[in-house]
């Protein structure tokens, strides 16, 4: 029985070893990793190994070869494939290579933005986002036997960040994600929150919690922001800094986290360790098995909540368990919409909504211009000079302003995320411009908060853009049925 099938059986709790995370690959030794996988297989409690296909740090060996060796030794690799450097076609080619080699499990991610400090880093591509990837793979996957995982980050503490994370998860599930892996984290209340959210929204895809043994090595990486979007709570950082605990205590802490996550109802845990040494993982598993029965008693001691932080949780706290109640927390009140948002909203209603007073007339004029060179250029220029100052328009030819609070993802999101944020934002700031530029989706949230208190996506997932429309008029494309939205309207 493979990993995904085991995941789908409640009592099974298969474990996964995060053997090659994308952030600790520099200096990794191939033989160490391969031997570590063999030790785990010999132990018998772990058959599944998580590997990054193309880690960010320079790597001297091929993840593909490691995946083949794991398969040959009787294990199962789960490959994390990121869209950072692949366009949609090369991505599928890479996926097919792995499938041909016998890999059945994948986690599809947008991928971290390459570090600016690294010399000779290739330019990232971000041709499509992860939701669009799931949409593109829908037909292709039917002919294969693969399980598609997606990632969600519950460890966001601003309403504007967290709500989109869960909304994006909903989108990923709706377009075919089979299982869900969390971003790495240490906050048990957040782990519990994700379970509650899925229960509330009838999301039945199995959930895999991502836990990395907390030690100074990983704490330094997190503090240096080398693992985008990952946070370690201050009390836990203090414990590690003050070296109050030795290695034994660090392993014991991970064992307790593992026991609690299993008790809470996670279907699996993906365990990682900065030391490539299976004996430590084995020790964590031994301890977790020993203490599993009393998992409820450990929640309080693993609570690293920083009392001073104004953190947002999706549900109200349950004072008895220290986790979450099933009652949704109150959200910030809606505010007055900005003039730019109100103006855009009005124009959109006037021109783009079929019931709008200008819809038919604008449609006729756009179709008239579409086949006349002079008029086409005239309308193109008009679109450019009106949308450039307002939205920083790049004339991508397939306008999605209506779906994103009238802000342009092409000009504002470095990873071109069109169906919700990546996991890299931190305290509301963009992964690529920490403390300088707000995450695009945080701004979208604030814009939408102008009209509704509970912000959710108002449009269905936006499919991958037709790049041949680049530098053409989105107005004409909309009314001549060339962009994604027009086709939708025609189908209705
Ligand atoms: S046409 Fe494309 S680039 Fe221009 S505002 Fe719309 S989404 Fe942005
Ligand atoms: S703007 Fe937000 S979604 Fe886009 S790259 Fe930055 S953090 Fe990610």
Image (cartoon, rainbow, N blue to C red):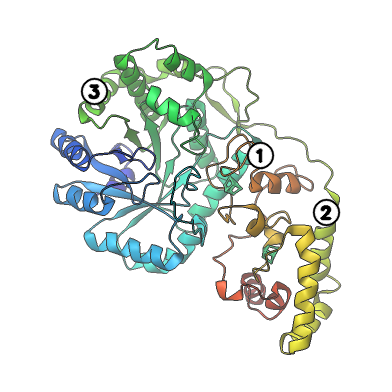
- Report the mark closest to the observer, 2 or 3: 2
Question: Can I make out residue 422 in this image?
Answer: yes
Q: Is residue 1 visible?
A: no
Residue 144 lies left or right of residue 368; in this view the side is left
Marks 2/3 in contact by CB < 8 Å: the verdict is no
The residue that mark 2 highlights is: 340
Locate the C terminus and report the quarter of the image it occupies.
bottom right
Q: Is mark 2 within 8 Å of ligand 1?
A: no
Mark-to-mark CA distance, 2 and 3 = 58 Å
Position in image of residue 489 (x %, y %): 67, 73
**Between disc 1 and disc 2, whose residue precedes?**
2
Residue located at (70% from left, 43% from top): 454
Name, please, the residue furthest toward the bottom. 372
Vertical comparison of 19 with 477: above or below: above
State the image coordinates of residue 71 (x, y, percent, origin top left): 19, 51
Using the image as rendered, state which of residue 42 and residue 425 is in the foreground.
Answer: 425
Label 1 crowd (10 A; few <14 / some 14-19 / many >=20)? few
The residue at which mark 3 appears reads as: 283
Q: CA distance from mark 1 to mark 3?
A: 43 Å
Question: Taking 223 as reference, is 418 left or right?
Answer: right
What separation in Å lies between label 1 and label 2 (alpha carbons)? 22 Å
Q: Which mark is residue 436?
A: 1
Q: Is residue 334 above or below residue 236?
A: below
Front position among marks 1 and 3: 1
| Residue 469 place in picture, x, y as percent | 61, 75
Q: Quadrant of residue 371?
A: bottom right
Q: Quadrant of residue 284?
A: top left
- Residue 315 lies in what quarter of the image? top right
Q: Nearer the viewer, residue 187 or 142?
A: 187
Q: Secondary structure at mark 2?
A: helix
Give the mark nearest the N terminus, 1 or 3. 3
């Amino acid at each position: 029985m493979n990993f995904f099938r085991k995941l789908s059986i409640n009592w099974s709790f298969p474990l996964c070893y995060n053997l090659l995370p994308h952030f600790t690959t520099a200096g990794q030794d191939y033989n160490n990793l391969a031997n570590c996988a063999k030790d785990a297989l010999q132990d018998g409690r772990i058959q599944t190994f998580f590997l990054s296909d193309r880690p960010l740090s320079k790597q001297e060996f091929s993840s593909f070869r490691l995946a083949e060796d794991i398969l040959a030794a009787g294990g199962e690799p789960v490959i994390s494939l990121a869209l950072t450097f692949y366009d949609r076609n090369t991505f599928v080619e890479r996926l097919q290579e792995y499938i041909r080699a016998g890999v059945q499990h994948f986690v599809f991610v947008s991928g971290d933005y390459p570090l600016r400090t690294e010399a000779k880093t290739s330019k990232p591509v971000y041709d499509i986002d992860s939701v669009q990837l799931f949409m593109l793979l829908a037909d292709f996957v039917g002919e294969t036997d693969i399980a598609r995982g997606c990632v969600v980050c519950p460890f966001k503490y601003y309403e504007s960040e967290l709500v989109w994370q869960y909304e994006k998860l909903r989108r990923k599930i709706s377009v075919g994600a089979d299982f869900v892996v969390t971003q790495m984290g240490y906050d048990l209340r957040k782990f519990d929150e994700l379970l509650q959210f899925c229960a509330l929204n009838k999301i039945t895809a199995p959930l895999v919690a991502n836990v990395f043994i907390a030690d100074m090595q990983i704490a330094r990486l997190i503090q240096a922001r080398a693992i985008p979007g990952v946070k370690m709570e201050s009390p836990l950082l203090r414990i590690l800094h003050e070296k109050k605990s030795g290695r034994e205590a660090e392993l014991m802490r991970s064992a307790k986290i593992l026991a609690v996550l299993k008790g809470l109802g996670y279907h699996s845990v993906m365990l990682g360790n900065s030391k490539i040494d299976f004996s430590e993982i084995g020790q964590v598993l031994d301890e977790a098995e020993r203490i599993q029965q009393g998992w409820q008693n450990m929640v309080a001691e693993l609570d690293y909540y920083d009392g001073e932080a104004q953190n947002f949780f999706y549900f109200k706290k349950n004072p008895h368990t220290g986790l979450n109640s099933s009652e949704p927390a109150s959200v910030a009140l809606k505010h007055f919409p900005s003039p730019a948002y109100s103006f855009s909203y009005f124009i959109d209603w006037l021109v783009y909504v079929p019931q709008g007073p200008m819809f038919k007339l604008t449609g006729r004029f756009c179709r008239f211009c579409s086949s006349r060179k002079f008029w086409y250029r005239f309308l193109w220029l008009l679109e450019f000079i009106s949308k450039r100052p307002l939205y920083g328009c790049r004339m991508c030819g397939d306008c999605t302003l209506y779906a994103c609070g009238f802000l342009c993802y092409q000009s504002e999101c470095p990873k071109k995320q069109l169906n919700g944020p990546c996991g890299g934002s931190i305290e509301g700031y963009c992964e690529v411009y920490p403390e300088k530029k707000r995450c695009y989706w945080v701004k979208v949230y604030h814009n939408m908060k102008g009209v509704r208190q509970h912000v959710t996506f108002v449009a269905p997932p936006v499919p991958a853009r037709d790049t041949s429309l680049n530098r053409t008029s989105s107005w004409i494309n909309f009314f001549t049925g060339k962009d994604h939205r027009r086709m939708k309207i025609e189908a209705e």
